[in-house]
Amino acid sequence: MASAAILVATAAPTGRRSPLPSSDSPSGPRPDGTHRRRHARPHQAQRHRAAPACALLLFLQVTFAATDIESSEWKGDLLAVAVTENDLSRGPDARFENAVLTKLDSQLGGLLSEASAEEDFAGKTGQAVVLRLQGQGFKRLALIGLGRSAPSTAAACRAIGESVAAAAKSAQAGTAAIVIASPGAIQEGFKLNAAAAIASGTVLGLHVDSRYRSEPNNVHLKHVDLIGLGSGPELERKLQHANYVSSGVIFGKDLVNSPANVLTPVVLAEEASKIASTYSDVFTATILDAERCKELKMGSYLGVAAASANPPRFIHLCYKPPGGNVKRKLAIVGKGLTFDSGGYNIKVGAICSIELMKWDMGGSAAVFGAAKALGQIKPPGVEVHFIVAACENMISGTGMRPGDIVTASNGMTIEVNNTDAEGRLTLADALVYACKQGVDKIIDLATLTGYCRIALGLSIAGIFTPSDELDKEVAAASEVSGEKFWRLPLEESYWESMKSSVADMVNTGTPQGGAITAALFLKKFVDEKVQWMHIDIAGPVWSHKNRSATGFGVSTMVEWVLKNSS
């Protein structure tokens, strides 16, 4: 039997409030303008102190164990059986042809047969039915629909875990077991990955962000058995890896879910520094304040930050592997707008969703979520720079106006024809900074354009890169993570709409092909010798169904780094 503990971070009030730093925490910069422990200096224009937002986090431990016990003999609160449409086929005697279902149905006196008919359960994807039992070793039995075939991808397996988590939360189950009705349909080489993905889906499905509620949503599940999916040290390693990645995804989700009056640029920098201090054997943190960024001539980034009462912070975490021996240097850059009002081109109308613009730092959440996971995994042979230019895009007398010209740190001038195309302005200086770290490859993630959301919907991120090699690497990483991406063209002829009569470029062109021109803009700030990819995550960063962040990008970035490590 193999087992690995997975920690599920859920917040519940404890009577005390966590001392999340507010942006007026006293501290001064070093002589070079950097802050290792970035507490902001008092800001006389600051009117809104952060609410006592975060209760102390309570970490609930969920253990996963592999076992080959017969599912009918398992004892506990919830037995979840994942079934395909074919598994529900019946022979001439009206009995299930599937061996697992036949045995359970016999044990339950035909209850499964009755329930599948009465509840109209056909095993289709997304279907689920939970039966309450008496006189059995398990109190409830859940049937989880898989569709036409057994799971063959990480995404499909993760969905099983999410469905089990939903059933466990509804039943307030403390223990659960998961069995695939036709385990032989899963390829032998995929079983361990399937087990890890199911475990990850269960953990992420259990996660409840209760930090801002007066009453907690408690998670009761403590232990999960995985039946018939393998065992041994290799599975234990896979489960532990799922633990690390899931913790990063949950961290990313919690960052995006945090409201803008709590997660200011200073507080985002503080959270990033905690990663460096927690994993100080492999991480260092450098935080630049506005004065230091001015010295580095980051005029594009500072132009966006100029209107806000909350000061900006430029965040740089550097991962170096234990023992050195670096063979490859990577950078992951994230957009870090902790709130985006649109500036003087203010967001108006329902489609702009100004009330959700706390999610405009979703790129930075993916960056720091990946950093948290990699700090635990500690991959060898690769150095990784995690870079975020954090600020707010607000409106005030000191703010950037439409028509202003700003100068980026590479000397290029930009005519700001739309203050609501601000993310690319912050990324411009972040990309220049990343190139100066001597990296071989850069990936940036940003909730950059509504155009990409319109083109690809809410589940798929758009990728833009001139590098076929980098495209293949991310495609391979996404196969493991289960996240969805689609490569879009970098059509150079579209740059014509980005030309300015008074500067090197404008910051936004015509609406047609808007996601492409945004990527072309970023390309101007990347060294030609560096392989680069831009990922627009405006669609999948947020689940409108769940009204919550998704943690999108964390898993794929972790797998991308690991592939470069190996």
Image: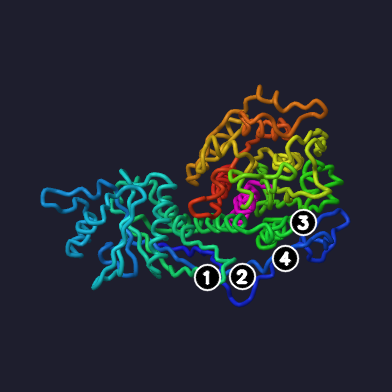
Q: CA distance from mark 2 to mark 1?
A: 10 Å
Label located before the other in sequence (4 or 1): 4
Residue 128 in magenta? Answer: no
Q: Which residue is mark 4?
A: 21
Q: Amino acid at mark 1?
A: Pro
Q: Is residue 523 visible?
A: yes
Q: Tell which of 501 and 34 is nearer to you.
A: 501
How far from the left and from the top, in percent, is residue 403?
Answer: 80, 35
Contact? badges 3 and 4 (CB < 8 Å): no
**Label 1: which secondary element:** loop
Q: Amino acid at mark 2?
A: Ala
Q: Which residue is at 65% across, 50% downward?
A: 361
Q: Amino acid at mark 4?
A: Pro
Q: Which residue is at 73% across, 48% downward?
A: 393
Circle 3 crowding by C-alpha within 10 Å: few under 14, some 14–19, many from 20: many
Q: Which residues fall within the magenta stretch?
A: 356-385
Does residue 280 appear to the left or right of 374 in the view shown? right
Q: CA distance from mark 4 to mark 1?
A: 22 Å
Q: Which residue is mark 2?
A: 55
**Label 2: which secondary element:** loop
Q: Is residue 1 visible?
A: no
Contact? badges 2 and 4 (CB < 8 Å): no
Q: Which residue is mark 1?
A: 216
Q: Tell which of 501 and 293 is nearer to you.
A: 501
Q: Amino acid at mark 3?
A: Asn
Q: Which residue is at 58% across, 32% downward?
A: 469
**Label 4: which secondary element:** loop
Circle 4 crowding by C-alpha within 10 Å: few under 14, some 14–19, many from 20: many
How far from the left and from the top, in percent, is residue 436?
Answer: 77, 40
Q: Which residue is mark 3?
A: 310
Q: Tell which of 528 and 303 is nearer to you.
A: 303
How far from the left and from the top, in percent, is residue 294?
Answer: 85, 46
